[in-house]
Amino acid sequence: MSISFSGLVSGLDTSSWVEALISVKQADVSKMQKTLVSQQTTKSVLNDTRSAVSSLRTAIEKLTDAKFGGTFDLFARTNAESSNAEIFTATALSGALKQNYDITVQQLATFTKATSLESASNIADDSTLLKNLGIGSGSLTCYVNGAKKVINIGTDDTVGSLKTLFSEAGINFNINEDGVMEFSAANNTDTIHIGATTDSSNFVSLTGIERQEDGTYISSNSIYKASISSLLTANDAGFKEQIKAGTFTIGDAEFTINENTTLSSLISDINSNDKAQAYAYWDDATGKLSIASTKEGASYINIEAGTSNFTDVMGFTNSEWDEDGNLVNSQMYTNAQELGKNAIFTVNGTSITSTSNTVTSDISRIDGVTLNLKRTSTEEDGKTTLSINQDSSGLVDALENFVSAYNSFIEKIDTVTATGAELHGESSLTSLKNTVRNFANGANNTNGGVYNLLSEIGITTASADANNLNADTNALSFDKDKLLAALAENPDSVKSLLTNENGIFGMMENTIEQSLKASSGFFDIKTATLDSNIKKTQERITKKNSSISTYKAQLEKKFQAMENMIATMQQNYQSFTSGGISI
C-alpha cells in the first residue's frame, strides 16, 4: 500500500492537479460506459420483444398444427356425453364420428372367484394359540347364576389353557368336529351368561358366540388351526396336509414357497404381482383361500400346480408327482371357481357382449369411443343416449390465447419503436407489425370457404364511434358465442380460414417465422450486431482505463521528480548560507 503526500517540499497541491488532469480523460470513459449501458438496454428490450413475437407464433401454431392431425388437430376433438351417467359414461378420441347412439345395459361384467372346495385347515386344537385365531388378550366376563367371573386372556394362552380358565369359572368349553365352539354350565342346574360391555378382549365379537334357547352358547364361526401368520411348510402349520416347498402358478405368474414363506407373505406376493391378474385372501371363518380375478368376464382363473402341492392343499387342483418331485399330471377343479359374467348391452338395438365393463371401440363398433358401463338399465330410465359432438373447448382456449398474444405483440412493438424508445427507427419491426395486423383485419379469399374474415368468426378490432372515441382500434377482441355459431354452421370453412397454408394464420405464421429465423432473421441479425458493438465498447473502455492508469503514473512520477529537485536545491542553499564564506 503506497501513501502519497502531495507537495510536502514545494507546498503545492500536486495530487489535485493529477486528479484534475485525469478527470479530463475519465470523461471519455464515462461517455463510453453510458454508450455500453444503452447498448445493453437495447439488447434486453430486443430480447423482450423477441419473446412477445415468439409467444404469438406459439399461439398461432396451436391452430395451424391441425395439419399434422391426431391430437394436434383442435378441430377434430370430440366430446362423448351420456344422457344418464349412472348407467354409463364415455370418452372420445379425436376423429370420433359425430352422431347419437341409443345405449341399453342388460348385464354388467363381474369377476371370477375361486374358493377352496373344502376347508384347507384343521380344526383348532388345544395347542392352538389364541392370538393365531385373532383372539386378543384382555378380560372376558362370565356370569354363573348371576355371579360374576372374570377370565383374563393372556398373549400366550392356547385353546387348552382357555378351556381350563372356563372350567375354573364353572363353564364347559369344547370345539366340535365342525370347529364350532360350544359352551355349557358345568353344573346342569346352573345358568350361564358370557360377555359384558366392560370386556377388553375381542373374544365375543370375533367368535360370534350366541346364547341358545337351552341356555348354552355356540359360536357362529368355526375355529381353525391354520392362520394368516402360519409358516406354510412348518409341521404345525395347521393345514390338513403338509405343504411342500416349491412352485405354483396363478395367471401368468409363478410363485415360490420356501421354509420362510408365511400365508400372509404369499398372499402379499400374489396381490402385488400384475401377471397373476388376481387378488387372494384367507378367510379365517371358513379356513379357505379365495382368489378373485382382477379381470372381468366369464373366464377361468388359471391355477396350476408346480413342484409344490400348495394348490392341491388349497383345493384348487388335483395333481400327481413322481418320486423325484416332478409333476406327472394335474387337473384344475373348475367347480371351485364361480365364473364371472360378461357385460351385455345394445347399441342402436344391436346386442353386444363384452368381457369388461370398459368397452373399447373394437367391441362396441363406435369408432374412437370407450364406454364405461356403470349399472343395468331399468324401465324407469327410459332411453339412454350417447351423443358425440365436437369438443370446442380446446379451440376456444387456443383462440383466446391467440388474441391475448396478438395484443401483447402489437403493444410491445408500438412501445419499443416509439420516438425516443430503444428500437425507434427499426423499420423491420414496424413492417412486421403492420403485415401481421393486415392479415388479422384483411379478407382472405384463397381458402375456398364461406368465411373470409376473422370478424366473421368472432375475432374483431374495436371501432371508434361517437360512444367510444378512445377505442383501441389495434387490439383484437374475441366473441366465443359467434365462433361457436360459425362452427355449428360450417366448421370446415372455419378450419380452412384459420389453418390452411394460405389461410390467415398460416400466412401470419410464415411472416413471423421469417423474423425469428436462426442467423438470417431480424432478431438474430440485430442481436449479433448489438453483441459486436457491446464487445467493441467494452474493449475500448478497458483500453482507455489502462491508458489513464499509465498517464496517472507518469504524472505522479514527474511531480515526484520535481519535489525531489526542489528538495535538493533547498539543501544546497542551506549549505551555501551556513558555510561562512569570507572575502
Image (tube, grey):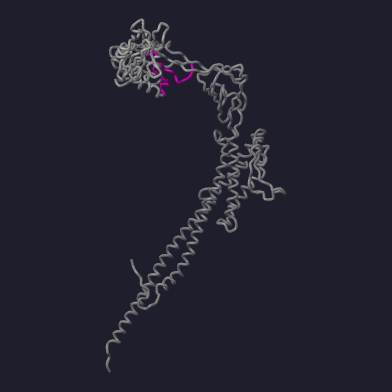
Seen in the picture, residue 310 relative to 549 is either above or below; the reply is: above
Q: Quadrant of residue 115?
A: top left
Q: Quadrant of residue 397?
A: top right
Region rendered in magenta? 274-297
Q: What predominant SS class does the magenta segment belong to?
A: strand
| Residue for point 57% across, 42% down | 59
Q: Is residue 399 visible?
A: yes
Q: Position of residue 466 (x, y in %)?
A: 72, 49
Q: Is residue 47 left or right of residue 202?
A: right
For the residue pair 176 and 39, the one nearer the viewer reads as 176
- The quadrant in which the N terminus is found is bottom left
For the residue pair 172 and 450, the one nearer the viewer reads as 172
* Residue 275 is covered by the magenta coloring: yes
| Residue for point 61% across, 31% down | 390
- The quadrant in which the C terminus is found is bottom left
Numbered marks: total: 0
* Residue 462 is covered by the magenta coloring: no
Q: Is residue 481 left or right of residue 521?
A: right
| Residue for point 33% across, 79% down | 567
Seen in the picture, residue 524 relative to 292 is either above or below; the reply is: below
For the residue pair 496 and 377, the one nearer the viewer reads as 377
Q: Is residue 342 left or right of residue 547?
A: right
Q: Position of residue 190 (x, y in %)?
A: 36, 7
The residue sitting at the right extreme is 466
Q: Is residue 243 visible?
A: no
